[in-house]
Image: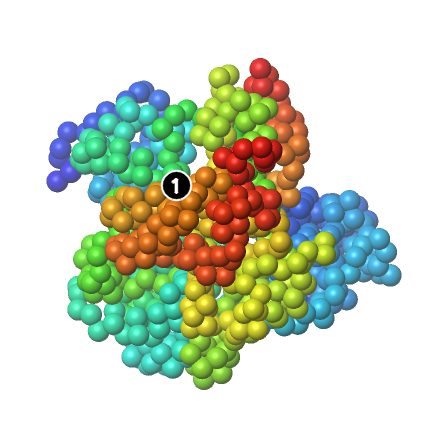
Amino acid sequence: MNLEELESTAAHERELCAGQKCRLRVCTGTGCASAGSDRLTQALRERAKERGMEGEVTVTEVGCLGLCAEGPLVKVDATDTLYQNVAPNLADNVLDSLTGEAAGITICNEKQPFFARQNRVVLENAGHIESDRIESYIARDGYRALLHVLAEMSPADVVAAITQSGLRGRGGAGYPTGLKWSTVAKANGPRKFVVCNGDEGDPGAFMDRSVMEDDPHRVLEGMAIAAYAVGASHGYIYVRAEYPRAIKRLKTAISRAERQGLLGSSIAGTSFSFSIDLRVGAGAFVCGEETALIASVQGNRGTPRPRPPYPAMSGLWGCPTLINNVETLGSIAPIIRCGAPWYAEIGTEKSHGTKVFCLTGAIKNTGLIEVPMGITLREIVFDIGGGIPNGGKFKAVQTGGPSGGCIPEQYLDMPVDYESLREVGSIMGSGGMIVMDETSCMVDVARFFMEFCMSESCGKCIPCRVGTAEMYKLLTRIATGAATMNDLSKLEELCSMVRETSLCGLGQSAPNPVVSTLRYFRDEYLAHVQERVCPAGVCPMTARKGVATHA
Amino acid sequence: MRDLLPKTAPPTADKRWRIVDTAMKRNGYAPDGLIETLHAIQETFGYLDEPSMRYVASSLRVPLSKVYGVATFYHHFQLKPQGEHSCVVCLGTACYIKGSSNLLEAVRTRFGIRSGETTPNNKLSLLTARCVGSCSLAPVSVLDGQTLPHLSPEELVEAICALDDTEEAAQ
């Protein structure tokens, strides 16, 4: 498919959509799906047929509309209205609203901060396109960036553009993407690979899942542009086995793109060829670490190895390999389409662009949001998130999953960027943001993450394998009221030991949740140790005599 | 070369082994395809047993110890047969702070099984997940592939009981 054909496909698809008198977009993201959106779609189609509205009403299934808390969501294009909590039995009310007043269904205010404060770049298509139809992606300027790159830009130009955009790795560490690309581009090797890291293992994060499920072609396009820039001809998408829908949709997307000549050999009639294979993970958090991921793609146990050599020099089968996260690759096409300066304008001085977060926990508007870097935590939690439900009081927000930390109230006005988050002892991470109120105990949270790291440790290096287990034991002693002050100082010693001596990121960052909670909520630890009480009433404290055990 | 070497016969005459063979063939019988092959076996037969692991080892020409090592390293692979129904309780952060451990406890009390166990009559298997990525619906469980949102312990037990005769599983 060349640019002309792409444009005619896009024009045809747009005409098709414009020709539909009334288009209903039903959100089929995980949130809405489990709230019954698939039954709703069916009901809408059936009722439209029975009422003889079949010709006028088109019901389309689209990706996540964002506000998972109020699902199922339905967007009616003709009246430009979004409805929330549309249970399957309300299908008739939606159809009624097309001809007259909306009754019996709740309108979702799209002017509320949850929508108004967002800046959608990676998620620009979510809620608009049907993920299984490539035409739907093409109609929203899909693959235009790839064809532009192939026709007008040299690989070096592409690397320069990405560097200029200031994009940094969205997997968590924030390594400059342009720098990574140029290292792989310069590396010598008979073969090079591009790998998309879709092993979103952080508990509390589902951004990548949403991108892969709702807009799979965006990932493929980003990978193809990356491959052209670094000189690779083959790529892998490593996706978790826990995301069966993402696997299915990516498979469909790959075969559709191949059929249209947008993947495979001689893309758009040029000499550039690029094919993509899917590799399904098997449930190991450590495989998000790039050297472990490489081992896993090659069919081995996912254990990391020391770096250097970095995968950019020696990765898959010893060849130079570019590994980028799903969201990073999802940002590529818009950067090429709208220009690097446009992207660099968004955000702060050192962290450019936007970031997708999953807002969950003790918060009113749970869901998927994309905000410009530099927004404050307060804006995210209280404006976009709508604050704490049931009159609860904000206690902390956890970012970065098991590698991150808990940020207390005093830092709510801090801008969200890579550096600020690191300064307060957390990390950007992949984008999970879990809000906690007074009912959460910080010792319990630290213990939860330590249990996670302990069982996810691959066992290769001793500081991580043994250290996390020892820290977990100490935290359990604290949580049961059996600890002494000596245990607390042992815990602190272990934190720095494990951090300094572990081989990979999992071990090095495993103490973070403990360190950050000790830093900001030390009084809670002291209450557990000295007074043997859990202020939030969460921990069992069974070691203390005369105290009823927590049910 | 590999084609010239004698082929190993599948452990049983079951025709479904063809699915597994196809998976190995797709990767050219290269050891790289080990995880893909194990996925194929688990999808086809529900779990990995010793004969199947021996078969993969000899077909891909890798040591049995490596096959066993990989199969036990990854949480997704099951080495024991699973019950007719599966209940996966999510223990992700969002679910955890909203009380998912109470869900586990409720299933344990009602059906007498812990995470990783199956009821004696092979009706129900209880599993846990690190995060199923449905955090905005916390706490969630996945019952036979269907995600159930905002669960209370009672609702989960009720939903399990509603699956045909799992009721007997409690005995």
As drawn, is B37 to the left or to the right of B136?
A: left
Question: Which of the two residues, A195 or B66, is positioned nearer the viewer here?
Answer: B66
Identified at 64% across, 40% down, the residue is B151
Say few, some or many: other residues with alpha carbon within 10 Å of mark 1 (under 14 / 14 to 19 / 20 or more).
some
Q: Is residue B87 left or right of residue A101?
A: left
Disc 1: which residue: A473
Q: Is residue A68 visible?
A: no
Q: Is residue A85 visible?
A: yes
- The residue that appears at 87% across and 61% down in the rendered structure is A101
Where residue A394 sits: x, y (%)?
62, 60
Residue shown at the point (62%, 54%) measured from the top left: A438
Q: Quadrant of the N terminus of chain A?
A: bottom left
- Residue B121 position, x and y percent, is 51, 16
Q: Is residue A367 left or right of residue B46?
A: right
- The location of residue A175, given as percent across then percent down, is 35, 70
Label 1 SS: helix
Looking at the rendering, in which quadrant would you find the C terminus of chain A?
top right
The quadrant holding residue A408 is bottom right
Amino acid type for the residue under numbered disc 1: Lys
Q: Chain of mark 1?
A: A
Q: How many marks?
A: 1
Colouring chosen for the image of the structure: rainbow
Q: Nearer the viewer, residue B67 or A482?
A: A482
**Residue A301 position by quadrant:** top left
Identify the residue at image location x=38%, y=82%: A164
Residue B97: x and y in percent read: 57, 47
